[in-house]
Image (cartoon, rainbow, N blue to C red):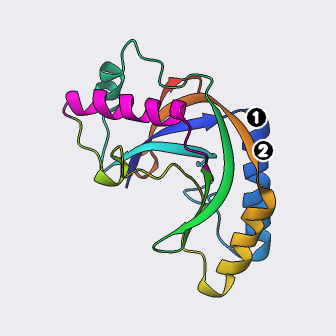
Amino acid sequence: MVAALELYFDHVAERRMRVLWDALETDGAPSLKGLLDGKHRPHLSLLGATALDPEVVKEALDGFDVAPPLKLSFQFAGVFVGRVLWLGPSPSVGLLGLHAEVWRRLTVAGIEMSPLYAPGAWVPHATVSMRVPRPMLTEALRRCLETLPIEATVTGAAVADHARGVFSSLRGA
């Protein structure tokens, strides 16, 4: 995915994730810290797409709070194909409901999104490292597990497409 609708966290949770990024970097595993000249911040992607027009997304979400002060409890770590390391929040009714409503509204607006983010297929996650070297994967996963749990509150949202230099706040980002 190149573009995403990202949810951001309170300062304490963001700081804890950044400390994890630093630890991974110290261990020699790449984190999101240095990706794209440090433009990333800890986030959870509600959806991914090849491209997103922020104005169309804003119009589709008009009148809907895409970033309510939703409580998230990051309780586990995982690895996607390609050695992408992530932290996972417990899939609460609130989080799944928010995701389903955003997906519904953007679908009605004709916005094309990755089927990996469709309700029922989406795995809620906050990526911490991409393409972890195979010999370091076990140690990097251990680092993640030692960091958990992380309690977070959603404080903002944005449409982000770092590859194209697009960042458009939807609320509080």
Amino acid tagged 2? Arg
In percent of width and height, residue 171 lies at 53, 22
Please state, as top left, top right, bottom left or bottom right, where the C terminus lies in the image. Answer: top right
Q: Is residue 151 above or below residue 60?
A: below
Which residue is disc 2 drawn over? 15
Task: Please report the residue visible at 59 percent of the width from the left and 65 percent of the height from the top.
Answer: 78
Viewer can see residue 25: no
Q: On the picture, is 93 further left or further right than 28?
A: left
Crowdedness near tag 2: few (<14), some (14–19) or many (≥20) residues, C-alpha within 10 Å? some
How many numbered marks are there?
Answer: 2
Viewer can see residue 7: yes
Report the residue that reaches farthest toward the front.
93
61 part of magenta stretch? no
Which residue is disc 1 drawn over? 11
Task: Please report the residue visible at 65 percent of the width from the left and 79 percent of the height from the top.
Answer: 137
Q: On the picture, is 86 further left or further right than 1?
A: right
Magenta residue span: 89-110
In percent of width and height, residue 67 lies at 53, 25
Report the residue that reaches farthest toward the bottom.
135
In percent of width and height, residue 2 lies at 38, 53
Q: Secondary structure at mark 1?
A: helix
Q: Quadrant of residue 33?
A: bottom right
Q: Is residue 20 above or below residue 165?
A: below
Crowdedness near tag 1: few (<14), some (14–19) or many (≥20) residues, C-alpha within 10 Å? few
Circle number at residue 149: none
Q: Is residue 102 above or below residue 143?
A: above
Do the residues under discs 1 and 2 have CB atoms within 8 angstroms? yes
Please state, as top left, top right, bottom left or bottom right, where the N terminus lies in the image. Answer: bottom left
